[in-house]
Amino acid sequence: MGLRGFSVPDEIYFLSMLHNIGATSSDKSLTLEEILRWTTLEPEKARSNMHKLIETNYIQVVSIGGVEKYSLTIDGIRKALSVYS
């Protein structure tokens, strides 16, 4: 049974998806467009989840060449992995 078989808040499910697609450090950060391609989420839903996760320090924003990219923080990685335990 996958994560969606359990009662997991949307933002934590989103966090787990980011972990699974490898956005786990600033050098592996992804743009919002890349995240949308990988996750197939609606843009507004992804932005809402992203905002919540940035506020809780689970996602960091980095600017690379003037482009905003997103990746998990150490706390975000821990939170994503805690879903499985």
Image: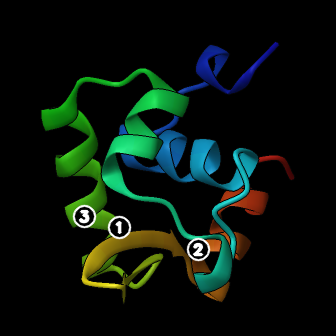
State the residue lying farthest toward the right: 85
Query: CB atoms at circles 3 and 2 under 8 Å apart?
Result: no
Query: CB atoms at circles 3 and 1 under 8 Å apart?
Result: yes
Q: Please name the amino acid that badge 3 sits on.
A: Lys
Q: Compared to 66, does 72 lie above or below?
A: above
Q: Which residue is mark 1?
A: 53
Whichever of callouts 3 and 2 sits on the residue coming sooner in the sequence is: 3
What's the distance in space between the residues labelled 2 and 1, CA to CA? 8 Å
Q: Helix or strand or loop: what does disc 3 sit on?
A: helix
Classed neighbour count for the residue bearing mark 3: other residues with Cα under 10 Å, few (<14), some (14–19), many (≥20) = some
What's the mark number on residue 52? 3
Query: CB atoms at circles 2 and 1 under 8 Å apart?
Result: yes
Q: Helix or strand or loop: what does disc 2 sit on?
A: helix
Q: Which residue is mark 2?
A: 76
Residue 40 position within the rendered picture, expressed as x and y whole percent measured from the top left: 43, 21
Q: Compared to 39, does 72 lie above or below?
A: below
Q: Helix or strand or loop: what does disc 1 sit on?
A: helix
Q: Please name the amino acid that badge 1 sits on.
A: Leu
Q: Compared to 5, does 6 lie above or below?
A: below
Whichever of callouts 2 and 1 sits on the residue coming sooner in the sequence is: 1
Residue 66 position within the rendered picture, expressed as x and y whole percent measured from the top left: 25, 83
Residue 67 position within the rendered picture, expressed as x and y whole percent measured from the top left: 29, 74
Apparent side of residue 42 relative to residue 39 in the rendered image (left or right): left
**Residue at image location 63% in from the left, 48% down from the top:** 16
Apparent side of residue 50 relative to residue 24 in the rendered image (left or right): left
Residue 14 position within the rendered picture, expressed as x and y whole percent measured from the top left: 47, 43
The part of the image, by quadrant, that contains residue 81 is bottom right
What's the distance in space between the residues labelled 3 and 1, CA to CA? 4 Å
What's the distance in space between the residues labelled 3 and 2, CA to CA? 12 Å
Q: Please name the amino acid that badge 2 sits on.
A: Gly
